[in-house]
Amino acid sequence: MELKEIQNLIKFVAKSGASEVKLEMGDIKITIKTGSDSEVAHQIPVAVQMPQAIAPALQQVDQPQITQSAVPEINTAEDDTKYITIKSPIIGTFYRKPAPDKPVFVEVGQNISEGDVLCVIEAMKLFNEIESEVSGKIVKVLVDDSSPIEFDQPLFLVDPS
């Protein structure tokens, strides 16, 4: 089984919504698990809004922080509509550099063209180069280096003009 076939299998499993797929072909055994960790992480902000009887002091501290962080996100979302979002085709670990001692693939403000390598995503001990499907200028890197990422998670904002 070739790398492209494995990548396509990972994409298919992520889109299908299956939680686990096992594939055995001769000597090759592949298990793909799509954890529900991301769902739990997205539900954590909801848990912050506890009844006042449980933790009134905690709420008074947390509520202003939540409203302050929500305002900049709304403003940036309005500004980002003219940009193209490059998303992750697979689940894995995001790396901006090919190696720790090498420079990053792309910087904010750098012009890119179709086919340029933007980053590397490690999945199942394989390092997959993610190439740009658009030409333009990198406006924003949305993920920190060495961060775990999900399928279809936004990675870069590109200004196509």
Image: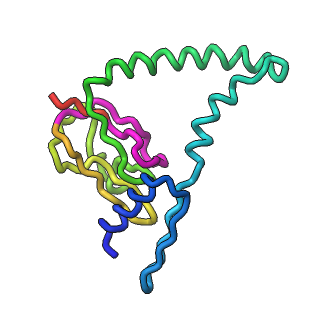
How far from the left and from the top, in percent, is residue 151?
Answer: 42, 49
How far from the left and from the top, in percent, is residue 107?
Answer: 27, 38
| Region rendered in magenta | 136-156
| Residue drawn where x is 47% and y is 74% of the image | 23
- Relative side of 98 to 48, left or right: left
Taking the image as drawn, is residue 100 in sight? Answer: no
Quadrant (top left/top right/bottom left/bottom right) for the C terminus: top left
| Residue drawn where x is 78% and y is 21% of the image | 51
Taking the image as drawn, is residue 107 in sight? Answer: yes
Magenta stretch: residue 79 in it? no
In the rendered image, the residue lying farthest to the right is: 53
In the rendered image, the residue lying farthest to the bottom is: 26
- The answer to whether 150 is drawn above or below residue 2 in the figure is above
Q: Considering depth in this image, is 34 or 159 the residue closer to the camera? A: 34
Magenta stretch: residue 138 in it? yes
How far from the left and from the top, in percent, is residue 71?
Answer: 49, 15
- The answer to whether 56 is drawn above or below residue 87 in the figure is above
Q: Toward which corner of the image does residue 16 lie, by quadrant? A: bottom left
How far from the left and from the top, in percent, is residue 114?
Answer: 16, 46
- Relative side of 113 to 9, left or right: left
Q: Considering depth in this image, is 127 or 151 the residue closer to the camera? A: 151
- Relative side of 16 to 98, left or right: right
- The answer to whether 57 is drawn above or below residue 40 in the figure is above
Q: Toward which corner of the image does residue 62 lie, by quadrant? A: top right
Q: Considering depth in this image, is 112 or 20 the residue closer to the camera? A: 20
| Residue drawn where x is 33% and y is 59% of the image | 128
Q: Toward which corner of the image does residue 47 lie, by quadrant? A: top right
